[in-house]
Image (tube, rainbow, N blue to C red):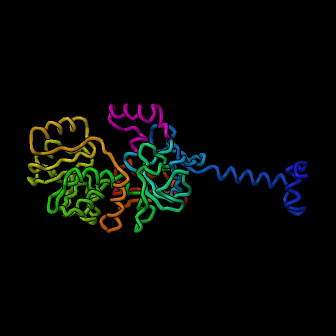
Amino acid sequence: MLNSLSLREIFESEIGEASPPVNEVLQITLNQIKKDALVQAIICTKYGPPDVLQPKEVAKPTPKDNEVLIRVHAATVTQGDCELRSLKVPIPLQLLMRMGFGFRGPRKRILGQELAGEIESVGKNVSLFKKGDQVFALTGFHLGAYAEYDCLPEKGLIATKPINMSYEEAATVPLGGLHALHFLRKGNIRSGQKVLIIGAGGSIGTIAVELAKSLGAEVTGVDSSKKLDVVHSIGADHVIDYTKEDFTKSGKTYDVIFDVVGKSSFSGCMRSLNENGYYLLGNPGLSQQVRGLWTSRKSGKKVVGGMTAHKAEDLISLKELIEAGKIRSVIDRRYSLEQIVEAHMYVDSGQKTGNVVITVGQ
C-alpha cells in the first residue's frame, strides 16, 4: 500500500536505478525551491554615503488580494532617493524624515520610487490588470523599486506602459512627470504665454519643458552650461546658463515661473513675473511658502507650493502624451542593479542631466 512506502522508496520506484541517489535529487529540489523563493535586492543598511547600499537576497514578495506582483525591469536614481539615503537635508526636514522613515535608518530598507516592469501575478480581487501586462509606476512612500520584484496596489499610481517606450525609458516618467504635470496645471498655461523653468535639465525639469511646449508656451530653460544643449534639444525656445547670467536682472518677464530647484531669489523671481502671473514652487523652503502666502494675498501675482497629490489618471495622461509624441525620456546614464553605489555617487555629484536608470535582472 502507498501508505506503507517511504518517500525514498517512492522516488526510487519513479527514477530507477540509473538515476542519481535519492538524497541528491531531494537536495537539488530543495535548493531550487529555496532559489525561487529568494530575489536580489539592494538594502539601505543605514543613513549615509552611497556605500550604505548593499546587495542582499530577500524573500520574494507575495501580492495581497488587491495587489499585483511586478517583475521589475528598470528603476531610477533620483535626487530624492539620494536625500533619503543620506539624509542630507535641512535639519527640520531631517527630523520629519527620521520620524516618517526611521531614526537610525530607513524602516523600508529597499529604496527606489519609480519602476517599469511586467506583472507576474495578481491578487484574487484585482480586476484592472492581468498577468503579462507591461506597466510603469510610482511606488511613493512604499519605495521598493531596487529589487527584482515589488508588489503594488492595483489602484495605486500604476498604469500600462506607453507602447512606444522601452522599460528603461518608461521608468523615468512617473516621478518627474507627475510632479511637473501637477504644478504646470496650477499655472493655467495658455498658448503663447512665456514660461521660465529653473532646473530645466533635471528629471522634473526636462518633462516640464516638454509639457509646457505641448501647451503652446514659449519656454525658457535655466540650468548649468553642461545641460543646455539637451534642454534646447527637447524643445526649449531659449536657454540661460545660471552660472553666467542672472535672469532676475535681465529685465525680461514671464507669465509662469516654475522653480524646480528652490534656490532662486524669491524677490528676484517676483520681479521677473508678470502681473497675474504664477510662481510655481516645486521644492519650496519654509520662508518661500510664508512669503508666497503673503504675496498671493497682497498682489495679483500667485505663488503656488505645498504638497502634491497624484492620481492614476494623471499617469495615464502622461502615457497618452508620450504615445502622441509630446514627451520623450532623457537618459543620462544606465547602471545595473549591482552598480547602484556608482549610480548614487553620480547623482550625488550634481552632474546628472535628465535621468539615471537602473536596469534590473538583465
Quadrant location of the C terminus? bottom right
**Percent from the top left, x then y, of residue 153?**
47, 48
**Residue 159 higher or lower than 281, as above or below:** below
Magenta stretch contains residue 102: yes
Camera-nearest residue between 300 and 333: 300
**Percent from the top left, x then y, of residue 112?**
45, 48
**Residue drawn 45% across and 37% down?**
47
Camera-nearest residue between 134 and 221: 134
Q: State which quadrant residue 218 falls in.
A: bottom left
**Residue 46 higher or lower than 34, as above or below:** above
- Picture mark count: 0
**Residue drawn 59% across and 49% down?**
60
Magenta stretch contains residue 335: no
State left or right for residue 34 relative to residue 128: right
Camera-nearest residue between 329 and 121: 121
> Residue 76, can we see it?
no
Q: State which quadrant residue 281 falls in.
A: top left
**Residue drawn 10% across and 51% down?**
274
State left or right for residue 270 relative to residue 322: left
**Percent from the top left, x then y, of residue 353?**
33, 57
**Percent from the top left, x then y, of residue 69?**
53, 53
The residue segment tinted magenta is 81-108
Camera-nearest residue between 7 and 1: 1
State left or right for residue 291 relative to residue 107: left
Dominant SS type (magenta) = helix
> Residue 128, can we see it?
yes
